[in-house]
């Protein structure tokens, strides 16, 4: 069974440009999460989808970030326009259920560098 | 507030020795899960071990064990018989609904 995949693995863009990150969860997982790790800091929650609906987007830093999950399958996270502080590793994770004892399976992450 | 604290930014251990990575957590929820993930230099997050808040026995998975002390709100990871391949970043996490992560501990195994 394929795990969570993310594309691209690396992205280097200039300040002001737009970048779109993609996540394909494990097939059948209704719950999809986005996280971000800024260098040297903890991994922080961005948002949670249940199928195509945003269950919790309390971690989204500002309105330059837009996440979608059309059809409840893959998800995209767009940053427009990108700022220097957006640099970091963006992780996607999926799980069958959103309960405390359910493991989340993480993708390999997308390393975003904004110059 | 939900919080995970890992106070050891870096740790060294001799190959074949045991090492303990510290993790404390804070939550007012009664139901929560505690997880440890390993992140090697390749970047992926690898699930290691899980402990539920109602589990009375410490979790074990091969060379990994979780020393769960609920009253102290600690969930330390013990790696026995360290191997060179254990060198990686280790994250402690707590799940209530979403995950909350610590800042991680970088473990280096010395030959």
Image: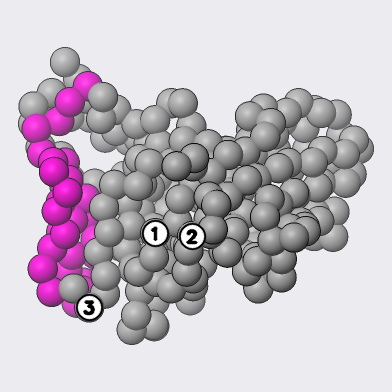
Do the residues at pointers 3 and 2 share their chain?
no
What residue do we see at 13% from left, 23% from top? B15
Q: Chain of mark 2?
A: A
Q: Residue furthest top?
A: B111
Give the number of the disc on residue A50: none
Disc tally is 3
Give the number of the disc on residue A95: 2
Q: Nearer the viewer, mark 3 or mark 2?
A: 2
Please name whichever residue, A66 or B69, is drawn nearer the observer in this view of the structure: A66
Image-quadrant location for residue A90: top right
Image-quadrant location for residue A112: top right
Assign a secondary structure to mark 3.
Answer: loop
Residue B36: give x, y in percent of width and height.
32, 51
**Residue B27, placed above or below residue B24:** below
Q: CA distance from mark 1 to mark 2?
A: 7 Å
Residue B16: give x, y in percent of width and height.
8, 27
Assign a secondary structure to mark 1.
Answer: loop
What residue do we see at 58% from left, 45% from top? A91
Q: Is residue A80 magenta?
A: no
Assign a secondary structure to mark 2.
Answer: strand
Please name whichever residue, B63 or A84, is drawn nearer the observer in this view of the structure: B63
The magenta-colored residue range is B56-84
Do the residues at pointers 1 and 3 share their chain?
no
Give the number of the disc on residue B54: 3
Tell me whether circle 1 and circle 2 mark residues in contact (CB < 8 Å): yes
Pointer 1 local density, CA inside 10 Å: few below 14, some 14–19, many at least 20: many
* Residue B79 located left or right of residue B99: left
Residue A53: give x, y in percent of width and height.
71, 70
Give the number of the disc on residue A103: 1
């Amino acid at each position: 069974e394929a795990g969570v995949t993310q594309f691209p693995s690396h992205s280097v863009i200039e300040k002001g440009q737009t970048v779109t990150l993609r996540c394909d969860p494990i097939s059948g997982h209704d719950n999809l999460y986005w996280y971000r790790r800024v260098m040297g800091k903890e991994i922080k929650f961005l948002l949670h989808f249940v199928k195509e609906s945003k269950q919790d987007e309390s971690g989204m830093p500002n309105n330059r970030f837009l996440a979608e999950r059309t059809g409840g399958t893959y998800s995209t996270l767009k940053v427009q326009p990108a700022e220097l502080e957006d640099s970091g590793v963006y992780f996607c994770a999926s799980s069958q259920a959103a309960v405390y004892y359910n493991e989340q399976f993480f993708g390999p992450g997308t390393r975003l560098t904004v110059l | 507030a939900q919080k995970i604290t890992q106070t050891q930014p870096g740790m060294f251990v001799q190959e074949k020795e045991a090492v303990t990575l510290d993790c404390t957590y804070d939550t007012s929820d009664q139901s929560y899960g505690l997880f440890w993930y390993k992140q090697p230099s390749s970047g992926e997050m690898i699930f290691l071990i899980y402990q539920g808040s109602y589990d009375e026995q410490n979790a074990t998975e091969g060379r990994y064990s979780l020393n769960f002390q609920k009253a102290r709100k600690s969930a330390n990871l013990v790696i026995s018989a360290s191997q060179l391949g254990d060198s990686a970043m280790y994250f402690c996490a707590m799940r209530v609904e979403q995950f909350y992560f610590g800042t991680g501990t970088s473990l280096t195994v010395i030959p």
